[in-house]
Image (cartoon, helix red, strand yellow):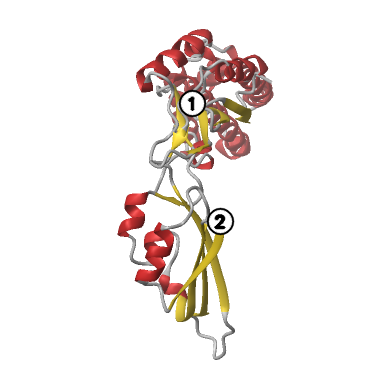
Amino acid sequence: MKPHLFVLINYFIILQILNSYIKSVLKQYFSIKTNKKHQYKTHQQIAIKHFSYLDETNNSSNFSIQVALCVLKTITINTHTMNNIFQQLIVVLLLTLAFSNISISQDTLSYEISCEVHKIYPYLSITKEKLTEAHTLTDLNTHYKPSWVNTYISVEILTSNNGKIRSTMGKNDTLSQEQQSNMHKADTNTDILVKILYLPQNTLSHNDVKEMTFTFTVAPDNDAMYPGRQQQLEQYLQENIMDKIPSSSFRQFNLTAIKFTVNKEGQIVAPYVFETSKEEKIDTLLLNAICNMPDWKPAMYTNGVRVKQDFVLTIGDMESCVVNLLNIRHN
């Protein structure tokens, strides 16, 4: 169901409820003797305040709301008898105002529509420069917390060196020279495994030895690149995506994401919809735009080894919480 249709249905239901309450108010008004000299009580003043606010902010021309305003501003009724009706009427009108403000905020607040391609970072990766500067386990993995450990039993680093597994041992979270050398000599584009045996930091009188592991990779020296670089990519996205999708298709906090891979040959492979636009035509247009891209320059290490690399095309509002699921912001 389209958002605008959903809002209209909500308004229709709320107005029906509102009409029934207003009829009840009018019925009570004509059946109860009024005292024009009687002053408004607290509930009446609160009701008038909220009705007036609704009238000023939304400029409603709806007959039912105008009648309600007229009744509340021009008549005086027995406060004790009408107390319940006023309370219920206030609740209904406040709900109406809330729904109105929600729908208005979704449609009228300004936000930037973005259409970009982002590199997807592996869960744990490190550049050669940072690997050279690494002296502790935290330098390799920012998520690692030394405060978890009371006593280290051993710290083992395993790498692939010329196709063979090589292990180097350490005593604590400080990397030894042998461990640093082992990591630098690891085969290109292979995982490096860190295995930690330790006694945990807690208040227990007895602790068993625990094991913690994490794996990371060394990122390629050069990322995959669209031919002609960033300016040409932006022009392609504008001509093949933005110019073909009406601006009315976008909503605040909505973000569409299409993931794809640039393989070792620079070809676009395995595109798929990660977060849908909710419109099949738009999803298809985005997939076609990605598939019809020219070949990229693949990701590469300085020794000439080419590797595949993952990317994601996003279109919409980058303030969406979907961004947190894409891993496109490197810590």
SS for tag 2?
A: loop
Find residue 165 and report its horizontal and vertical position in percent.
Answer: 55, 63
Residue 100, given in percent of the width and then of the height, sits at 53, 24
In this rendering, is residue 321 above or below 51?
below
> What's the amino acid at mark 1?
Gln
Q: Which of marks 1 and 2 is nearer the N terminus?
A: 2
Q: Which residue lies furthest to the front in this view?
A: 162
Whether residue 40 is visible here, answered yes or no, is no
Q: Is residue 141 placed above or below 99 in the rendered structure?
A: below
Residue drawn at (51%, 17%) of the image: 294
Foreground of the two, 6 or 33: 6
31 and 222: which is toward the camera: 222
Residue in view at x 57 percent, y 73 percent: 211
Q: For mark 1, what is the residue?
A: 252
Q: Mark 2 points at which residue?
A: 163
Q: What element carries label 1?
A: loop
